[in-house]
Amino acid sequence: MASEQWKNDIAYAMTPFKLLTWPIGVWPLQVYNIYSLIRCILATCCMSTIVILPIMELHMGCTDAEQNVDSFMLVFCGILGVLKIICFRIYAKNLTNNYGSAQNDYLTIKNVEHRAIMRRHAFLGRILSCFMVCFSYFSVIIYSLIPLLGDDEDNRINMTNENVILEYPMPSRCALEYLGFPESMYQVICLFEFIALILTCTCNLGNDSLYLNITLHVCGQVQILKASFIDFDVSSSQVCDRLNALIRRNSYIIEMAKELANAISFVLLMQLILSSMQLCIMGFQFILALKMNDVVMMGKSFVVLCTFLTQITVYSFVGDYLKSQMEDIGLFIYQSIWYNLPVKLTKNLIFIIMRSQSPVKLQAGNFIVVNLATYMSILKTSISYLSVLRVMVEE
């Protein structure tokens, strides 16, 4: 019965993220062989088209202002997706250690309250993942259908009309003509671009979900550690061994959190830079759409804004949560009955309290702390910039 329980717990906590990341070759608990490398290379090559084709369109000057904005957005998404795959492969050991540790945590958990804490954090990871991934897939469907369902009958697809302008899910008409793709392959190309867009969302939001899920698990382990300190029984036997075990557990969790922070540092830096730029660009497009009463453009801009804001919001929330959990270790030790412990042991607790004053943080480029304060700063700067542009447009 217990065996089935921990199997169900592991499946509940990890299966959705395995389904998202195994096809692109970054699932931490996979066998890192030639087949996983092939999956990773294929996903990277497919995503590269999201970057190359829009850049070619911009270089050839075949796009209007709205398509230019779409091209920049796709280029940013493609770059982020490729970076996340590459970084997660480079730092595969960090993620493997953390997910292997999470498996071991589910195997060894016995306390019912501690298990409830782990399940609660797993549930939060599933909810965040479901919201981000489903919303991004919905955005891709909207973006893919809008060019194909235009209201103007003259712009609809008619293979017998040589003067018709074909519309693709992403700006790529001139690039495809330059590369020599015939118009008879229009439907095949549309399907390929749609798959590439879905894959880009998976590489972006799927990898985000994978990382945020294990970070939340570490936060859950910190919460269990705090509960163990506050409920520590000094009257039982082997006090020294049990307290030393908690101290070693604290050091182990800190090491796991450091590995996670190191794995995401460069990706977070690029995420903040590109997302901030995209928020300003799409915000300005939304202002212009309001000015021209263009409902389609407003809808597209709003969807993209929500997608990028969701990424920044979730990273900021989880980063702030991890930092606060790490800081609270010292407070919970102070609130425990440490004064009934032997003097030799209380000296060790001082070092843990001192260490909690410099908690592990998610940092972008190892110098920008990703938390709610950073999130609010990005929002305020973006809104100020857009307010100035709105005044210029109205004048």
Image (cartoon, grey):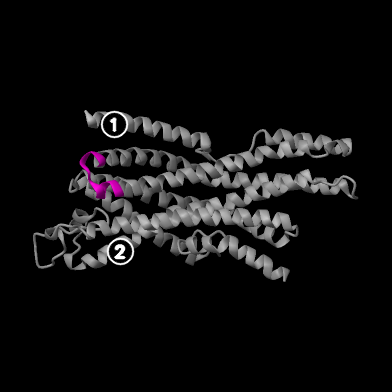
Q: Can residue 45 be spotted in the picture?
A: no
Q: Are marks 2 and 1 in contact (CB under 8 Å)?
A: no
Asked if the stretch drawn in magenta spans residue 212, the answer is no
Residue at 28% from the left image edge and 32% from the top image edge: 390
Q: Nearer the viewer, residue 199 or 122?
A: 122
Residue at 30% from the left image edge and 45% from the top image edge: 72
**Residue 188, x across and y down, in percent:** 26, 67
Residue at 36% from the left image edge and 40% from the top image edge: 279
Where residue 389 is drawn, which disc sits there?
A: 1
Residue at 68% from the left image edge and 67% from the top image edge: 5
Q: Is residue 42 left or right of residue 113?
A: left
Amino acid on which the number 1 mark rests in the picture: Leu
- Classify the position of the N terminus by image quarter: bottom right
Q: Is residue 247 above or below residue 376?
A: below
**Disc 2: which residue:** 192
Which span of residues is magenta-colored?
290-299
Amino acid on which the number 2 mark rests in the picture: Phe
Mark 1 element type: helix
- Which label's residue is closer to the chain start, 2 or 1? 2
**Residue 59, x across and y down, in percent:** 22, 45
Q: Can residue 306 be spotted in the picture?
A: yes
